[in-house]
Amino acid sequence: MSPDRATCFAACIACWIAAVLLSSSCQEDFDADMTEDARTVRMKSCHSITLSIVKGTSNNIEKMAKVYETKMGLTKEEAINHVILTRVMTCYMNIEQSEQDNFMAGGQMSSTNLQDIFGSSRKVPQKPNAASERQWSLLTAVVQEARITSEGTAEVKPEYNEEF
């Protein structure tokens, strides 16, 4: 990744953290009783799942990003980063342990799993718009580590034809 893209990505993450701090509620993080290692593994899994899906749905991601370009005045790249980061955090909040275990064991994610993980139908105690600074910082660290080590692109072969 070029330094300009890395700077843009870092600025996007910083903007998100600032927005979250200004709008987050006083609820306790859903992952407060998880170990730091468990949180990191969960975020890395969601980062990998999201990137794998993004590869197959770039047209849909760009359409979603257009909305943020217009509404928030973001550049195309910032808007795409916004969509991807939101999807990673959505996965982090929604994924069930059995789904994470299945993914980590090399299992396929079904269309239903992906809809549940990236959708809004699950009843979860915390939503991405209420993510804490600690959770956004974890996402930032996972993204930076993946970029440095060129990891985070585990192969997921979802059983769906629709774009998420």
Image (spheres, helix red, strand yellow):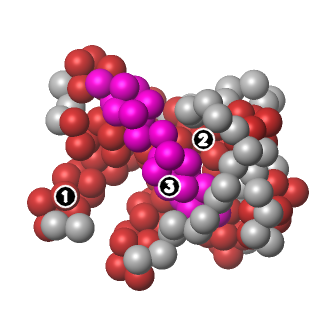
- Mark 3 against mark 1, which lies toward the viewer? 3
Q: Where is mark 1, residue-wise?
A: 5
Inspect the image, locate mark 1, and give the three-letter code of the amino acid beneath it: Arg
Q: Which numbered circle lies on residue 18?
A: none
Give the residue at x 34% y 33%: 62
Rendered location of residue 127, percent (x, y): 63, 34
Q: CA distance from mark 2 to mark 3?
A: 13 Å
- Segment colored magenta: 43-66
Q: Where is mark 2, residue-wise?
A: 90
| First reached walking from the N terminus: tag 3 or tag 1 | 1
Q: Is residue 26 visible?
A: no
Rendered location of residue 155, percent (x, y): 60, 65
Inspect the image, locate mark 3, and give the three-letter code of the amino acid beneath it: Leu
Q: Is residue 81 left or right of residue 135?
A: left
Mark 1 surroundings within 10 Å by alpha-carbon count, few (fewer than 14), some (14 through 19), many (20 or more): few
Q: Which numbered circle lies on residue 51?
A: 3
Q: Quadrant of residue 131?
A: top right
Inspect the image, locate mark 2, and give the three-letter code of the amino acid beneath it: Thr
Q: Is residue 16 left or right of residue 55?
A: left
